[in-house]
Image: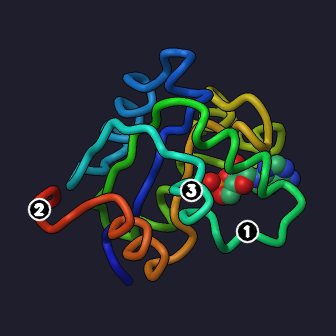
Amino acid sequence: MSNRTFTMIKPDATSKGYTGAILDQIIKSGFSIKALKWTKLTPAQAGEFYAVHKERPFYGELVDYMSSGPIIAAILEKDNAVADFRKLIGATNPAQAEEGTIRKKFATSIAENAVHGSDSDENAMIEGDFFFSKLERF
Ligand code: CMP
């Protein structure tokens, strides 16, 4: 079990001014920030990040959306980080997310779902490496 995960605060949430509230909830839930970046993905970068979903019908929509505005990317640390963070953000579809979860509070739809959270330790490493050099994390 690794103690790190990776997250993005997505364009729907940054454009609505939820960035501070989401980061606050993450920190108050016991995660410490090991790397943080405010950036905007090109369509090519969004497509590469989500390449695992290339065959899905929503891939084009996902790439357009994820490159439509600024995002926050971050590496987070906590015991049992991957599983605990997925619990904190709630189900992919905010309509099915539990009360109090980040997606229940801040997401718009299954596509525009406010935050990303890695689904495994292996993907947390890959996704963190996508955004951050060794100099940008500790
Ligand atoms: P995320 O957890 O970042 O991983 C894949 C993303 O694809 C997901 O959040 C949503 O933003 C998006 N996604 C998943 N399912 C659908 C769907 N059925 N329709 C549109 N977008 C989706």
Question: Circle 3 sits on which residue?
Answer: 44
What amino acid type should be assigned to the residue bearing mark 2? Answer: Phe
Q: Which residue shows up at 56% across the image and 65% down it?
A: 48
| Residue 34, x across and y down, in percent | 20, 55
Q: Specify the amino acid type for callout 3.
A: Ala
Name above or below for residue 61 compared with residue 86.
above
Label whose residue precedes the other's in the sequence (3 or 1): 3
Residue shown at 56% from the left, 51% from the top: 116
Marks 3 and 1: which is nearer the front? 3
Residue projecting furthest to the top: 17
| 20 is higher (above) or lower (below) than 47 | above
Indicate if the residue with disc 1 has its beta carbon within 8 Å of ligand 1: yes
Mark 1 burial class by Cα count in 10 Å: few <14, some 14-19, many 20+: some
User: Position of 118 compared to 76: left or right?
Assistant: right
Mark 2 vs mark 3, foreground winner is 3
- The answer to whether mark 2 and mark 3 are in CB contact below 8 A is no
Establish if 86 lies above or below 113.
below
Query: Disc 2 designates what residue?
Result: 138
Q: How is the image coloured?
A: rainbow
Which of the 4 image quadrants contains residue 104?
top right
Q: Which residue is mark 1?
A: 53
Q: In whole angstroms, how far apart are the C-alphas of marks 3 and 1?
A: 14 Å
